Amino acid sequence: MPFGKKRFSSRLSNPNYLNFRKRVLNRDSFCCQYPGCGSSDSLEVHHIKRYSLCRGLRTESANGITLCSGCHKKVTGKEEQYEQMFSSIVRGNQRKAGYKLT
């Protein structure tokens, strides 16, 4: 198993991480949030600010966005380029869902 996959599978045994994924997927209505996509297949939760660099944001739903696997591959490693756009999409989704924005 590749190193990255092993680390990811260990996250899936963490109840806090599972709860984070569930909250993000629910908020994003179980579809890819990349503009123009909207797929509901092969969904993944992407960390807007890198998981490895922002320990305190790892399970904050405002730092997650739902992407299909194809769109996730497009943006991985380029988080800084997409951070503002994804954060804006998340804020809009939070408003629609009635979240209290801080």
Image (spheres, grey):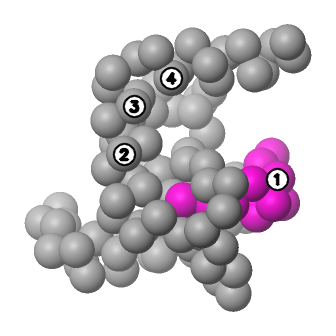
Point out the image quarter for the N terminus: top right
Local crowd size for mark 3, using a 10 Å CA cut-off: few (<14), some (14–19), many (≥20): few
Rendered residue at 35%/59% (across/down):
26
Rendered residue at 41%/17% (across/down):
14
Rendered residue at 87%/16% (across/down):
2
Report the residue marked by disc 4. 12
For marks 1 and 4, the one nearer the N-term is 4
Q: Secondary structure at mark 2?
A: helix
Q: Secondary structure at mark 1?
A: helix
Q: Nearer the viewer, mark 1 or mark 4?
A: 4
C-alpha separation, residue under disc 1 versus residue under disc 4? 19 Å
Local crowd size for mark 1, using a 10 Å CA cut-off: few (<14), some (14–19), many (≥20): few
C-alpha separation, residue under disc 3 versus residue under disc 2? 6 Å
Report the residue marked by disc 1. 73
Q: Look at label 1 and name its amino acid.
A: Lys
* Label pair 1/2, CB-CB below 8 angstroms: no
Q: Is residue 76 rendered to the left or right of residue 34?
A: right
C-alpha separation, residue under disc 1 versus residue under disc 2? 21 Å
Q: Which residues are magenta?
A: 66-77
C-alpha separation, residue under disc 1 versus residue under disc 3? 21 Å
User: Can residue 102 be seen by looking at this rendering?
Assistant: yes
Q: Look at label 3 and name its amino acid.
A: Leu
Report the residue marked by disc 3. 18
Residue 74 percent coordinates (x, y): 83, 60
Q: Is residue 30 above or below residue 73?
A: below
As for residue 94 lying within the magenta part, the answer is no
Q: Nearer the viewer, mark 1 or mark 3?
A: 3
Q: Is residue 1 above or below residue 68?
A: above
User: Can residue 34 be seen by looking at this rendering?
Assistant: no
Report the residue marked by disc 2. 22
